[in-house]
Image: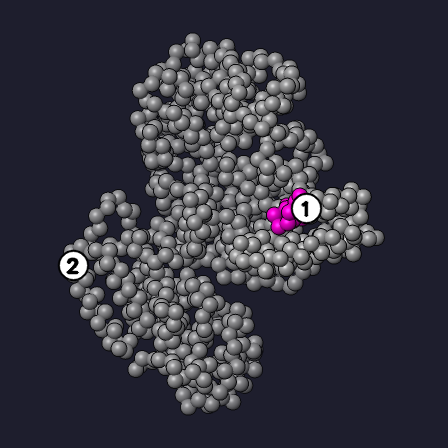
Amino acid sequence: ASFRRVRRASTSELGRLLSRPIWTSQDRQYILGALAQLLLDKEYTSLIGRQLRPLLLDLLQRNADAIKAGNQINHDLHERHCVAMSKLIGSHPDVLPFALRYFQVSSPVFQRLFLESSDSSTIRYGRRRMKLRDLMEAAYRFLQHEPSLLRELWDWSVCLPLLRSHDTAVRWYTANCLAVVTSMNDEHRLTFLKKILSPDEIIYFKLKLLEEVHAQNIEKSLVLANPDITLWHRRKSLPHKQDQIVSEDLCSSVVAVCGVVLPKQQLKPKDEESISHLILVESTCKNLQRLAMAVSFQNAVLLEGPIGCGKTALVEYLAAVTGRVRPPDILKVQLGDQTDSKTLLGMYRCTDIPGEFVWQPGTLTQAVTSGQWILLEDIDYAPLDVISVLIPLLENGELLIPGWGDCIKVAPGFQFFATRRLLSSSTGWYRQQNAYATLLDKYWVKIQLDNMTKAELKEVLVKRYPSLKVTSDRLLEIYIQLTGDKHQRQNGDTVGREQAADTMLEQIKEEKAPTLEGRGLSLRDLLKWCNRIVHNFDSSSPDTALNVFQEALDCFTAMLPKQGSRLKMAEAIGSKLNISKEKTEYYCLLYKPAITIGELEVTVGRVEVLRKQTETLLIQREKQTFAATRPSSLLLEQLALCINRGEPVLLVGETGTGKTSAVQYLAKVTGHRLRVVNMNQQSDTADLLGGYKPVDHRLIWLPLREGFEELFIQTFSQKQNAKFLGHIQTCYRHKRWHVLLKLMQHIHKVAIGKERQTSHMGSLLKEKWEAFGLQLNHAQQQMKMTENALVFAFVEGTLTQAVKKGEWILLDEINLAAAETLECLSGLLEGCCGSLVLLDRGDT
């Protein structure tokens, strides 16, 4: 059946389904499929795109899937799909990235020209196939929006014969396409057109072009006048009424984010479990919808708000639901006043082969060239050279890299995010002064985030911790009393804001409101507190209130330097939990947790830490000389609790108060290896992460020898070849590297030949031997280059080794280290989900 006959049948069925009072899941799928078919009809393309704008990407994706259904290309649908996209790219900015992704794996618009000579007999078209003038018009529209990419992606030489076509419209669009492809200026283009068309035809088509521009402006106005927000509602009940399409009805290649449909990458099964589930309260939903809308329009986004309001979490959630869970799909960079533009752009670095330098692109360069997402944290702290790199990127979509290449165009899919924190004062929130980032203000889509209201905080607690529902009001009262009025504000409610401010003034006058010293509390502290107390929470137990009180002391008062301030805040917390003043004073001034060392665990007060069994015997032999005073015992309990929860710890105190010794003692009794790094003003990121350094040949040959011996034992008999393995070790000890290399290469050839003769049993072993052969070739190349030169290799830093092996690390005197050295730690401070990026090694 022809496309028009199928369209008529689907239209009549669509009308029948729309009249039903309730739609089933099959009905909704059929409705979306019928709308996708109507979108391919050029008479209805603009109308459907305007009226069903939120569903547009889903309809386009359905058509793209239908084109390749059954492992065969439907060329008729492909041409109609291309023409439909060309009519939509002017008024719908999210269609162009979709079209570019489609053309990366599909044929050009004018694929008919390639097929007519050879495969025309096997290509099936409908009775009313697309006219050639429509195809060339579509090609011209795509070329106008993305000339640099399509100029190289498509082979335009097949269009040259169309310059002699009897259809003047075909000649007009073909001539203009070739003028853009060959980068003609206006004078050369006019001369070229005069050779193809008559003067009257040129005037006619120029007037027609003006009419199309006018019609396009009208279409843009109609799209803007048709609000998208009315088409989306948060689902609070399961039953679906008439004219309701739910998020589950969309195809798997797109995802609906608060009513905005975005393209979605396919996730690996292991990544699906790591998606963090954000509680979509009203303010979060509005901010997420604005963020998704900015992404669909490919605008750079600046998220602005106080500490702990969810700026980074919002971007990470949007990245996760669109299939970008981990690097390199989304890259994060913590900026500081010492950040160098080379970190973002890249630099030449040495390799393990002497004299060889390779270009290592920075995080921003990788994101721009690969079409990835990048998030720059704290853009207000960026120095001027970083801002000067970002200006041409945001203004023209070009990245300028001095000394390497001329200019890099932004790849499809690239998305730029940045965060800027607001600081609090008595009069409200304010931005950091004298920040160079203000130069970028005119390029951003700015999203202002605020702290959640009390009602929203309660909704978050109830949904995230259902077992705490009975006590959520009490927990919020304590938290809001400690944080002041920042969660009391309602949008536009000036009366409520004034009342909250008056209440706070009265509390301060009466000295009832505790004042926080140091950093302010945020939502992150509240969630950390709830994460602790939800473990073994029992509302019927009489000890629950005391456990909640003790966790509050650790989360809210442990950071205060003065004993009086801690006691005052503890009394405020205890009064809300019905804990007497005497008991409060006891836990603040007299409480000393007991330390018990068992065979399998170490108990410190209310916390149990499991011991590593491999180190138990060694620990028991050592004599313990740790004096368990009250301050040290209390510190051990706090440390043990942080260890069980996977929380990073910062210990602050005078010299000689037992900070380092407490950590060392806890590591010793639990059997964990502790790495201690003494930081100073000269500490570098290479000390923590690693870098290329001159090394001895032994460091290169040690992993090779160990890998060779492991593979050798798996392939040959260890007992019969004991003498040969002893010879290998002798060559290693006496530094006879050439002999060692020849022996390994000989055995490698024998092993590969043996595995080829065996059956499927040795397929995995064969792959290991082949990979080892590549390492041998690399080592041979290194040896040739290092006969009269130093050997360089990437030596992992202390922090990297500790992260890989699951060991503890203590950075002593961290306040002496430079800011740029500490920025590498930001990725690890997210708890159990933290990670490190080794830029010097080429990781992303």
The residue drawn where x is 47% and y is 13% is 587
Q: Which-is-in-front pick, marks 1 and 2?
A: 1
Q: How far across and down, in percent of the image, does residue 731 sit?
A: 78, 46
Circles 1 and 2, Cβ within 8 Å, touching? The answer is: no
**Seen in the image, is 683 located left or right of residue 108?**
right
Quadrant where the N terminus is found in the figure = bottom left
| Identity of the residue furthest to the top in this view | 582
Provide the secondary structure element on which disc 1 rests: loop
Residue occupied by mark 2: 20
All told, the count of numbered labels is 2
Amino acid at dot 1: Gln
Q: Is residue 12 magenta?
A: no
Tell me if residue 230 comes above or below residue 729 in the rendering: below
User: Which secondary structure is most common in the magenta stretch?
Assistant: helix
Q: Residue at x 66, y 30 (%)?
A: 676
| Vertical order, 293 against 6 (above or below) | above
> Which residue corresponds to mark 1?
720
Of 11 and 326, nearer the camera is 326
Magenta span of residues: 708-719
